[in-house]
Image (spheres, grey):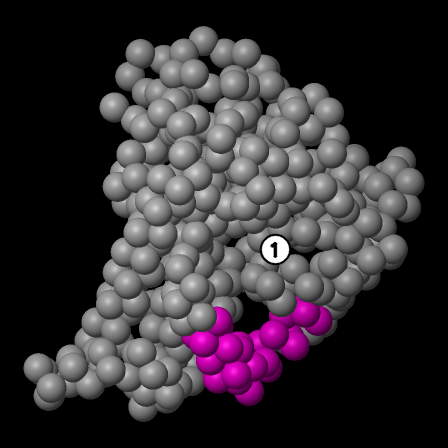
Amino acid sequence: MLAPFACDPHHSRGRLYEESTTPYRNEFQRDKDRIIHSNAFRRLEYKTQVYVNHEGDHYRNRLTHSIEVASIARSIATELNVSADLAEAIALAHDMGHTPFGHAGEDALNNCMKDYGGFDHNAHSIKLLTQLEQRYAAYDGLNLTWEVLEGIAKHNGPLTTDIPDIITQYNAKHDLDLCHYASMEAQIAALSDDIAYHGHDLEDAVRAELITIEDLMEIDFLSDYIKAVRNKYPDLHHNRLIYETIRFLNHYFVDDLLAMTRQNIAYENILSEDNIRHLKKPIVEFSHEAEERLVLIKSFLFAKVYTHDKVTEMTVQSKEVVKRLFSVYMGSIKLLPDAWYALAKNATTKACATIVADYIAGMTDRYAIRECETLCNLTFSTSSF
């Protein structure tokens, strides 16, 4: 039985287009399945997390990242007795709007769109889920429940200013209560994202030989754990040692989040979903100590990994690919596939730019590289880590 402040799938606020229920899946399970079966979700396999797709088979991509986030979110939600199905669905879909080449691609596309309203991957996730995924006969999008769409739109907090047009437009049809916090399940998904990427980006960086275990010893609370593992297993290979370290890190942050959230639930006397949504702060959070440790790891990643020469080289090339593709399609929309050209041929300049951006955002790394090599005569480096 779920806690009284959980989102109960049997009392969902419903879908934009009403549908009959199914006897063997609750509404959030149906949403999870719709997300998994979508084209955009499958394309995440070939979209960058940190390392471009061709750089190695063992590095995380957006798909494996999303699965890891969902796994953490499900465990936390289960332990807090809220809807694990809802937390998992939000976690699986939270990055569906990402461009090729991860944040580098998003930054480049946002810059290309600066005169046309910009580009935001979170807003694009909503657009994919409500418009661009075209699978069903009765409607565009996946027709997900209010709770899943609310969680994706607001998983980083309420939206009160600078709300992207696509979210404003959908909200006019299916009010997502943008000015209040999202459900506990959505907040769990958001912080599960932090737990997942802080850990796996460190692990991938060691495997890519961008950093060493000795570099990680600079982070005090990690160095103590690494020393303890080395004392117990003095001949342990660095691949096993980094995995043990990330296991420790994930358990630490999950345990801390659970303890702090339970404390908040008791202190705020949380008895319903509305109590959570109308609170003036998140109900799901880390302790001050854990927040400081996340900042330490994030600072380390920026200093030693995200700005590493090899990563920077790929970042520069990735941005150039997106920039050139946007330019060439805007210069000749007939180069777009037929279905996209049909949308763009009579559109205003701003609308045309949005269509081009939507098309580029849907590309995988390898497709974007191939298109750029064909259309722009740009050779993308294939050197691997």
Q: Position of residue 361 (x, y in %)?
A: 64, 51
**Looking at the figure, which quarter contains the C terminus?**
bottom left
Secondary structure that dominates the magenta span? helix
Residue reaching furthest top? 20
Q: Position of residue 380 (x, y in %)?
A: 61, 75
Say which residue label 1 marks. 99
Give the residue at x 63% y 29%.
177
Q: Amino acid at mark 1?
A: Thr
Residue reaching furthest left? 232
Instruction: Give the quadrant of residue 200.
Output: bottom left
- Magenta residues span 295-322
Q: Is 320 part of what is drawn in magenta?
A: yes
Compared across the picture, whether 166 is left or right of 38 comes to: right
Give the residue at x 76% y 39%.
165
Residue 253 sits above or below residue 131 on the image:
below
Give the residue at x 69% y 29%.
170
Depth check: 323 or 267 in front? 267
Residue 238 sits above or below residue 123 on the image:
below
Q: Position of residue 82 (x, y in %)?
A: 34, 33
Q: Is 372 part of what is drawn in magenta?
A: no
Give the residue at x 75% y 45%.
161
Q: Residues within 10 Å of mark 1 (few under 14, many from 20)?
A: many
Depth check: 195 or 239 in front? 195
Instruction: Give the quadrant of residue 254.
Output: bottom left
Residue 280 sits above or below residue 326 on the image:
above
Q: Mark yes or no: residue 35 visible.
A: yes
SS of the residue under disc 1: loop
Q: Position of residue 134 (x, y in %)?
A: 59, 29
Q: Mark yes or no: residue 56 visible.
A: no
